[in-house]
């Protein structure tokens, strides 16, 4: 990065911080703070082991230092400025989840930036379903990372003092790692009234939440589909699955037509075909509905995470906090563009051309001198695709 580019970005990041009121996280004085300054050359210098009391008032620090990246710790400490983790005196930590487009199995090199971010938002919504419905967490903070994904901060009291192994169990659950089908089932004894009948045990999938509920939803959706078909098509559809021959398909079709309530109840003992199908759906449901989080982030009680409201030095976009009801409509390539960089154009020297979607517009750039909206110029310069031109 040329010195002119470095000086320009440092100055404009400072302008942003002077105009922006950034909220401190809870217990800010007990957290470790870190930042990356703007420096020449390909590498970055990471300055950490700071207490906020040492840095000064947050708004003053940001306006003065104009950092490329700004972070605070998930953990709270007795002495956050101690230079070794053992000397800090760990007290508790938020539970952090990091979703990044780089870790999503559904994205490919051919996907555009906007497409990868949309896929990442789908994963975010799945993660929130786990956290809110399966675990019942209530103190959640959702943040667009400023680049390729989202962060979720869980601050419920119940998780604050969990060690790494306990956090790993939560990670394994949302990833569906080590899921055992048998553990999802509940049993109910029926029959055996006054000793006149032999009792039987029915096995049920949950119908409301958890991995069992997700598998049950897939089973119910299939049987609703089958219910609306004529018999010939229905039997052919059911026989697409392993261990479902014509006889089992006929039985399942009969249940779909006449005893659908048993399917809705999750009764796998109604006929073995339903357990066969549920078992077959399980790995597919896990593969498609897990939340592909960056696992080390969630298990690390000392992790530093980006400061909401700060600027991401690799995109020039805002690390944007989001209310729960804002997520669905949120477009990061529009809504995370800083107001500081809107409203005027700048000259840049494009070194890596191509099509860029940003600010609600699509730009096709060729290498060489160009005049572009400042938010686009900042995006290109922070991503190493342009240098600051002479005005």
Image (tube, rainbow, N blue to C red):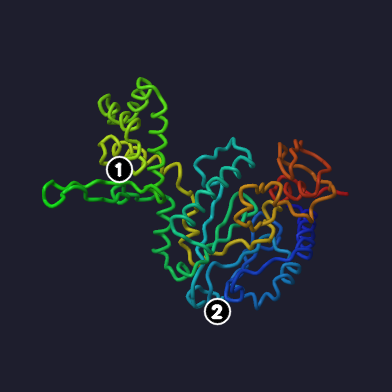
Q: Earlier in the sequence, mark 2 or mark 1?
A: 2
Residue placed most toward the observer, 238 or 294: 238
**Local SS, label 1:** loop
The residue mark sitting in front, 2 or 1, is 1
Residue placed most toward the observer, 367 or 292: 292
- Which mark is on residue 79? 2
Q: How far is mark 2 from mark 1, CA to CA?
A: 55 Å
Give the farthest residue toward the left.
196
Residue shown at 72%/71% (left/top)? 61
Give the farthest residue toward the top.
232
Residue placed most toward the observer, 367 or 213: 213
341 horizontally vs 27: left or right = right
Q: Are circles 2 and 1 on residues that touch, CB within 8 Å?
A: no
Using the rendered view, name the quadrant where residue 247 is placed: top left
Residue placed most toward the observer, 316 or 267: 267
**Local SS, label 2:** loop
């Amino acid at each position: 990065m040329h010195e002119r580019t470095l000086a320009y970005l440092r100055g404009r990041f400072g302008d942003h911080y002077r105009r922006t009121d950034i909220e401190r996280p809870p217990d800010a004085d007990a957290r470790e703070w870190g930042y990356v300054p703007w420096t020449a050359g390909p590498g970055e210098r990471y300055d950490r082991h700071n207490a906020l009391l040492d840095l000064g008032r947050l708004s003053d620090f940001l306006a003065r230092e104009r950092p490329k990246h700004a972070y605070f710790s998930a953990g709270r400490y007795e002495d956050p400025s101690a230079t070794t983790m053992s000397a800090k005196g760990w007290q508790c930590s938020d539970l952090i989840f990091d979703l990044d487009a780089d870790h999503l199995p559904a994205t490919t090199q051919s996907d555009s930036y906007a497409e990868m971010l949309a896929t990442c938002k789908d994963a975010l919504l799945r993660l929130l379903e786990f956290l809110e419905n399966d675990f019942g967490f209530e103190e959640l903070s959702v943040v667009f990372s400023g680049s390729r994904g989202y962060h979720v901060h869980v601050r419920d009291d119940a998780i604050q003092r969990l060690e790494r192994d306990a956090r790993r169990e939560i990670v394994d659950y949302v990833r569906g790692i080590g899921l055992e089908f048998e553990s999802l089932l509940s049993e109910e004894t029926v029959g055996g009234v006054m000793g006149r009948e032999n009792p039987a045990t029915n096995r049920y999938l949950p119908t409301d939440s958890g991995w069992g509920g997700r598998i049950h939803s897939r089973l119910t959706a299939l049987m609703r589909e089958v219910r609306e078909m004529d018999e010939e098509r229905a039997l052919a559809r059911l026989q697409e699955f392993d261990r479902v021959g014509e006889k089992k398909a006929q039985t399942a079709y009969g249940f779909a037509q006449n005893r659908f309530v048993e399917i809705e109840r999750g009764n796998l003992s109604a006929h073995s075909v339903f357990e066969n199908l549920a078992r077959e759906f399980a790995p597919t449901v896990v593969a498609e509905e897990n939340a592909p989080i960056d696992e080390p982030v969630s298990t690390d009680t000392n992790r530093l995470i980006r400061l909401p409201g700060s600027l991401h030095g690799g995109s020039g976009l805002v690390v944007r906090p989001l209310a729960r009801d804002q997520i669905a409509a949120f477009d990061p390539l529009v809504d995370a563009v800083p107001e500081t960089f809107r409203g005027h154009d700048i000259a840049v020297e494009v070194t890596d051309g191509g099509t860029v979607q940003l600010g609600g517009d699509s730009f096709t750039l060729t290498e060489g001198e160009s005049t572009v909206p400042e938010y686009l110029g900042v995006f290109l310069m922070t991503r190493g695709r342009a240098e600051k031109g002479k005005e």
